[in-house]
Image (cartoon, rainbow, N blue to C red):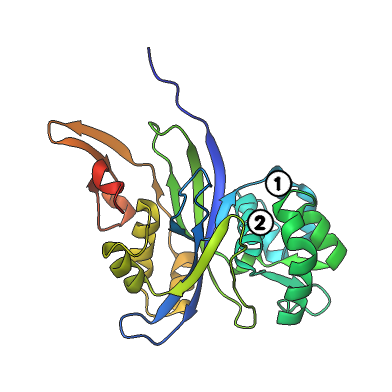
């Protein structure tokens, strides 16, 4: 009997980045540690993100996007989910005051977070209700499409995940929510990989591959510009079974350093 393939759930995640001056890195990314009771990537260091909610697909949200972002866009719902999730998980809100056209200030962010952050996370209100009540524009134009990964067909839970990158607003203070994520850190790509290798961080395979790519860039401006200028290759890993064991295969066209990885090894990274 052929095993039924689990359906894909749309998801979005965001690499919030800022320039830095460190020995081994010139930029760093905000990451959170998933709660150990979360059923996916529990205890792992991940980018803020999650599943696309039905409320993220409400067409009424189009009126709360920049004019340049109101045309038909297959990534629209993913971008909206990305902004909502970064607000819920990282206390970063990529949104503008519609009266001034400027990103929300630190003081405004703190007021919005106190009023809306947990109700949004708990499903008590929708992102549309918040932007309507607060006269906000979701700054989807600040998101560069960084990567696209689809969970292999043999996995029991599968996600269609779009990765985005954005410059973290310098006047907003990122912090984890204490619910889905229990800790957070600003760290450089090379620093993260070194600590993962040393066993200080748990970093799942897709996250590590994209951290490695992030480490190729020298600044926030260069990584965001590249994300906006280049085509994103969809990565759907496949399994290869040999006498040596099981391996995960990634198309070389995706541009990652690894194209074949022992599945047992993935359990350790």
Q: Which mark is residue 186?
A: none
Q: Residue furthest top?
A: 1
Name the quarter where the N terminus is drawn: top left
Residue occupying the point 53% across, 56% down: 13
**Is residue 220 in view from this perspective?**
yes
Query: Based on the displayed image, in which of its 4 quarters is residue 208 positioned?
Result: bottom left
**Whole-Å distance between the Cαs marked 1 and 2?**
8 Å
Residue occupying the point 43% across, 41% down: 151
Query: Based on the displayed image, in which of its 4 quarters is residue 67 positioned?
Result: bottom right
Residue occupying the point 70% across, 43% down: 54
Q: Earlier in the sequence, mark 1 or mark 2?
A: 1
Whether the residues at callouts 1 and 2 have beta carbons within 8 Å, the answer is yes
**Is residue 15 in view from this perspective?**
no
To which residue does mark 2 refer? Answer: 80
Q: Position of residue 6 (x, y in %)?
A: 48, 29
So how many labels did they put on this image?
2
Compared with 107, 15 (above or below) is: above
To which residue does mark 1 refer? Answer: 57
């Amino acid at each position: 009997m052929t095993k039924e393939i689990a359906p894909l759930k749309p998801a979005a995640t965001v690499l919030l980045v800022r320039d830095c001056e460190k020995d081994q890195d010139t930029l760093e990314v905000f990451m959170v540690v998933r709660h150990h009771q979360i059923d996916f990537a529990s205890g792992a260091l991940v980018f803020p993100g999650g599943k696309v909610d039905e409320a993220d697909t409400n067409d009424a949200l189009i009126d709360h996007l920049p004019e340049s972002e109101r045309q038909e866009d297959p990534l629209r719902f993913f971008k909206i989910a990305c902004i909502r999730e970064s607000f819920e998980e990282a206390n970063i809100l990529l949104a503008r005051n519609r009266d001034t056209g400027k990103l929300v200030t630190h003081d405004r962010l703190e007021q919005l977070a106190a009023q809306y952050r947990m109700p949004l996370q708990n499903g008590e209100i929708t992102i549309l209700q918040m932007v309507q009540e607060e006269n906000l524009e979701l700054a989807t134009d600040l998101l560069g499409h960084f990567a696209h990964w689809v969970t292999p067909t043999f996995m029991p839970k599968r996600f269609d995940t779009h990765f985005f990158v954005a410059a973290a607003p310098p006047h907003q203070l990122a912090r984890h929510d204490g619910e889905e994520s229990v800790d957070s850190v600003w760290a450089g790509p090379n620093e993260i990989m070194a600590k993962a290798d040393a066993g200080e961080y748990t970093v799942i395979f897709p996250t590590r591959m994209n951290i490695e790519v992030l480490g190729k860039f020298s600044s926030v401006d260069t990584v965001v510009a590249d994300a906006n200028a280049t085509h994103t290759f969809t990565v759907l890993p496949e399994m290869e079974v040999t006498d040596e064991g099981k391996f995960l295969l990634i198309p070389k066209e995706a541009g990652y350093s690894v194209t074949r990885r022992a599945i047992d090894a993935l359990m350790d990274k």
